[in-house]
Image (spheres, rainbow, N blue to C red):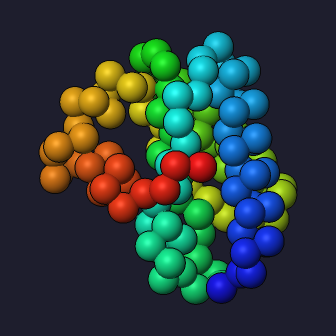
Amino acid sequence: MQCENETTEVLRRAKRIITEEVEKAGCRVVKVILFGSRARGDARADSDWDFLVVVDRELPVSQLWDIADDIRLRFARSEFWGDVFIQPLTVVEQQQTDTGCLTYYALREGIEV
């Protein structure tokens, strides 16, 4: 597991990268939520970083995937591995109580960055 300073630095870089890429697409980040093993505190040294990114407006799914790909590429260039799920606020609001959706678990166990 990383020390607290390293974790803080990765989260700072991740949020900056996420914000820059989302803004390039003409959207605004509403919130970034870290979830999964890193948020629960049971991550191993080789665990990836899982993020739910809530954006202010709807975009075609293909564009959301393209933005997420750009973010993951920049994460890799920054030498950390992460997965990014980007959803519009309207979708998050619809799925927040649906136990069949990733959104439910990310909101339940996640930590806002």
Q: Quadrant of residue 77?
A: bottom right
Q: Is residue 66 above or below residue 47?
A: above
Q: Nearer the viewer, residue 81 or 99?
A: 99
The percent coordinates of residue 52 (x first, y second) are 47, 46
**Count of numbered badges drawn on the protein:** 0
Q: Residue at x 44, y 66 (%)?
A: 36
69 on left or right of 106: right
The residue that appears at 17% across and 51% down in the rendered structure is 100
Between residue 29 and residue 58, name the one nearer to us. 29
Q: Residue 81's spot in the image, x, y percent?
A: 67, 64
Q: Position of residue 18 (x, y in %)?
A: 67, 39
Placement of 24 over or under 2, stated as above or below: above
Q: Is residue 99 left or right of residue 32?
A: left
13 vs 52, left or right, is right
- Identify the residue at horizontal 75%, vertical 31% (top origin): 20
Residue 113, horizontal then vertical, whole percent: 59, 49
In the picture provided, is 110 more to the left or to the right than 21? Answer: left
Q: Nearer the viewer, residue 79 or 28?
A: 28
Q: Residue at x 60, y 21 (%)?
A: 28
